[in-house]
Image: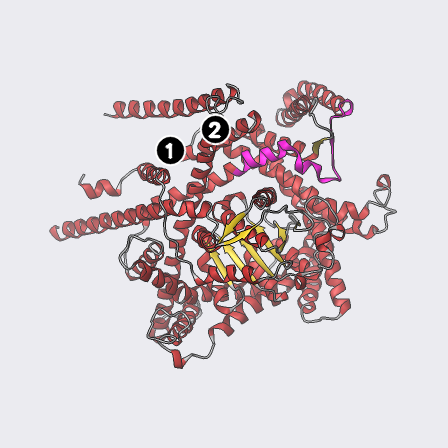
Amino acid sequence: MAMKRQIPFALVFIFGIFMLFQYFVPHESSEWVYEFLLDWIYIIGILALALGIWSLFRVSVDKIKTKKPNWVYSYVTLMGLFIMTVFGFTAKTGDSWGLYPVFVITFMLALFMLIQVLAKPASRNLYGLFGGAFLLAAVLIAILDRTWGFYFMEAKGLQNSMFRIFFDDVMMPILSTMFALLAFFIASAAYRAFRARNLLASLLLIAALIVMLRFNPYLPYAAYVAKVSNWLMNVPNLAGQRAIVIGIGLGIVATALKVILGIERGYMGKG
Amino acid sequence: MDFSTFLWTTFAVFVTLATFSFLYKDNPFYKFAEHLVVGVSAGYFVIILWYNGLVPNLFDRLKDGDWYLIWLNSSKPWYLIPAILGILMWTRFSKKYSWVSRWPMALYIGIATGVAIPLEMSNRVNKQLFATMTSIDWTNFFGHGHFNLLDTTSGLSQVIIFVGALSALIYFFFSKEHTGWFGGVANLGIWTLMIGFGASFGFTVMARISLFINRLQDIKAWGIEALDASPRANPNYGPGFLIVFWLFVAFVAGYIVYELVNYFRSRTVQS
Amino acid sequence: MDIFEKMMKLDRRWIFLFLIIVCVVTYAIPFKVPILVEPEVRSIYNFIDSLPPGDIILVAIDYDPNNLAELHPMTYALVEHAWRKKLRVIFTALSQNGPGMAEQAILDISDSLKQDRTFNGVHFKGREIKNGIDYTFLGYKPYYALVILGMGQNFRLPFPTDYYGTPLDSIPMMRGVLNYDQVAGVIDLSGGSITDAWISYGQGRFNFPLALGLTGVMTAQYYPYLGSGQVFGIMGGLLGAAEYEELADNPGRAKDGMRIQLYAHMVIILFIIMGNVGYFAERRRQKREEKGR
């Protein structure tokens, strides 16, 4: 029982108090321990993030297995994950790609069969057989084709042209466009919800209009509107946001203290 | 520009328009783009974590040891400890052994919370309070040099910031009922906050529209490249470019016509 | 159904279509919008302009492709300005999906430095920008708050190597550069909470000059830090980027996009007015109906 809860809470307390007091102790040994701990935390943190990737894989396979709504698209997610990982770990050794496209296709098919083995247990033998065959073909190509190779310790995969293409022409456009949709939603929200119902809403509306019109040269006294907007940002806005910042700071300190002292325990989970 | 680059930039525009099609309604093209980006981003994250995280911070430090002994005879074997702690985080998925993941998590949470307390207190609370309680510039109360109510550094502006910040902080104090003079000051606080939120809204509109403008700029850049790559404009380019371009335009136009036909058909059925 | 009721029940897809048409038509017509420069942007420009050649600045490209619309123009204008002034730049990319995008931007900007250009009447000869001499790209590490703290002790603590795997000790530019003490200032270009970490964990602990380049959504929230002197400048959104381009005499996507912003803002204001007109008309009708009863 102590191993499961008491010792972790004790660890939180010990390391929390140490880091808190370390801020006020400029001695060399305190700085040495601080750097040592930071160094360790980077490695622990990086390995912990792998949990997210495993979680994505599990959730997608589960979606296919239980045929949840839009389960077909989980194949797209998983193939996207695998193909990007393969591109990232491979690079050309010379000028040409040789049989690299064939390798990628056979390896992707092998991984597809793996998904099918996990998601469709009834036919796992058949998928396993095909998966094994594709994997064998991929391994043979990887061994025999010397025009490209796997790189795990050198960052050559980052320069793989297909890796860069998938980043520039798949990830970047879709991510940018997902957020660009918000332009339309804000226009729709402005039309449907932004009402001057009372004094507070009217104040909000007037402040918003002044800020939105600050760079409009067609207005009469356009320079004056810009000055009013600048004053609005640097005086009343600053005052209100300052109160929020102070409130957030006090909240963070209070929560952090509660975590260190063991009053807040939700992060450990149940059991 | 070579044909492969043009093909992929056309794909980029395709996924951009597929994502924008969500504005009309949810459809298979949008779902495909959405799921693709989730998978590709996860794959990208794996590669970045590996090359920028694990390799320099862990593997490079253990490199002088023998890998088949799991680097046990490296000159810095103590780096295996955070590696093991990080791997222990993966027990989170096990029902029986998930308590083991609490130990490395305790280390991380203790360090993060301990570090946060003095820094957040100093920067979010103390420095903001010091900045609010500055001495008022009575000699330049209405502006520096001449009467100017829009001078953001005048004594009047300082008074407004002080009163505004204090009243907004009082608004957030919910342990006392907001009645009488206390309620009046809290009211002033919420007015100050509303001006801040209005200013935020004004900036948010600009932010959201910017995202859409960027997509327009990218689509325009692709269009210019496409025209530049036509055999008529540049005899070095083959007919492949035009075929890809017009196939793409036909596909997009075809989908729009299909949706329009469905729309008018449904309206005819309704009437 | 009277006109006001129809207005209130308008399908939002007509609003989307109207906005698209206005933006596309405005984009097709070339015209310029005058840009008035705010003091908070001017202070960043003046800071970079005042640094002697050879000084090092840290540009934190801490944003994702989601936010590149507003922050990329800032990056391009700022870094080109710094390199034309022969400053050396350390880049970080502490946002998860950002390193590839940051690398692409760095390579693009270094390409444009090869050309001779004139800015504000001063002629700059083109030059080759070399990795390891004119810039170092440190790349990405997770848990940005601890990375920012770690860099304050020693850049090599979170970043033993740069983005390409080269040990920092073998990079000519990084010799003698231990931590923020050897850096003239930090400009953080970010679309999320990484800015809070730079202010609290970076500037708060190590006291270096810090300026911010922010998305429009976040800008209003960071004015208190400008007021308290914790940051010396803020570039807010596409307008902030356009103001920097104006100061640097280097028009780019930001200035190009401001003309669309102008008309898009007018359209949104029109929608707000229409919405309020419809709302008040509806309220008056309801009050009349209640009086009638």
Reading the chain from its start, which is encountered first: label 2 or label 1?
A: 1
Decide: is C188 above or below B90: below
Rendered-image quadrant of the N terminus of chain C? top left
Mark 1 residue type = Tyr
* Residue B53 drawn in magenta: no
* Residue A168 drawn in magenta: yes
The disc label shown at residue B124, or none: none
**Mark 2 highlights which residue?**
B228
Q: In the image, is B188 to the left or to the right of C191?
A: left
Q: Few, some or many C-alpha atoms within 10 Å of disc 1 (few <14, some 14-19, many ≥20)?
A: few
x and y percentages locating residue B197 in the rendered image = 39, 58
In this rendered view, identify the residue nearer to me: B120 or C167.
C167
**Mark 1 highlights which residue?**
B24
x and y percentages locating residue A221 in the rendered image = 28, 60
Q: Residue at x 36, y 72 (%)?
A: B185
In this rendered view, identify the residue nearer to me: C77 or C195.
C77
Is residue A154 visible to the viewer in this orientation of the structure?
A: yes
Is residue A70 visible to the viewer in this orientation of the structure?
A: no
- Main SS of residues in magenta: helix
In this rendered view, identify the residue nearer to me: A243 or A58.
A243
Residues at marks 2 and 1 on the same chain: yes
- Give the magenta range: A143-172
Q: Residue at x 73, y 46 (%)?
A: C166
Quarter of image, res B200: bottom left
Distance between mark 2 and mark 1 Cα atoms: 31 Å
